[in-house]
Image: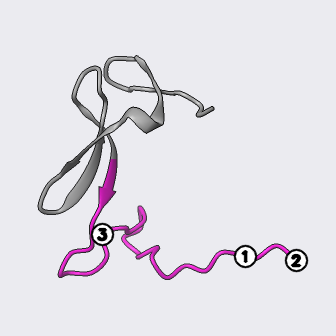
Amino acid sequence: MNTPIICPHCHSLIDPLTLETAVSATARYQVCPECDRPIILFADRTDDGPADTGPSGVSQADTQLAQAA
């Protein structure tokens, strides 16, 4: 069973598997099936570099995660 998430807009409990997908020129969105507002954003890479920069503006794309021994 999936853990439901709460829509930040309409506050409905939503099964994550029921989220609808929308696509724009620069990003993919997961849309709440109740209020049709985007709640999850997946930014695509741009010509200027990766779109997944952290708050400092430094790209997080090449960050290595520690491996558990």
For the N terminus, give its image quadrant.
top right
Q: Kindly identify the residue that appears in the image at 40 percent across and 17 percent down.
A: 12
Q: CA distance from mark 2 to mark 1?
A: 9 Å
Q: Amino acid at mark 2?
A: Ala
40 shown above or below 10: below
Q: Is residue 2 magenta?
A: no
Residue that badge 3 annotates: 51
User: Picture quarter containing residue 52?
Assistant: bottom left
26 shown above or below 63: above
* Magenta span main SS: loop
Question: Does the residue at mark 3 contact the one at mark 1 (Cβ under 8 Å)?
Answer: no
- Is 11 in front, or is 33? 33
Q: Check residue 8 in the rendering and tell me which mark sits there, or answer none.
A: none
Could you classify mark 1 by the number of other residues whose Cα lies within 10 Å: few (under 14), some (14-19), or many (20 or more)?
A: few
- Is 17 in front, or is 10? 17
Q: Which range is magenta?
A: 41-69
Q: CA distance from mark 3 to mark 1?
A: 23 Å
Residue that badge 1 annotates: 66
Q: Amino acid at mark 1?
A: Ala
User: Picture quarter containing residue 56?
Assistant: bottom left
Q: Kindly identify the residue that appears in the image at 41 percent across and 76 percent down.
A: 59
**Residue 27 at x, y percent in the picture:** 22, 58
SS label for mark 1: loop
User: Picture quarter containing residue 44?
Assistant: bottom left
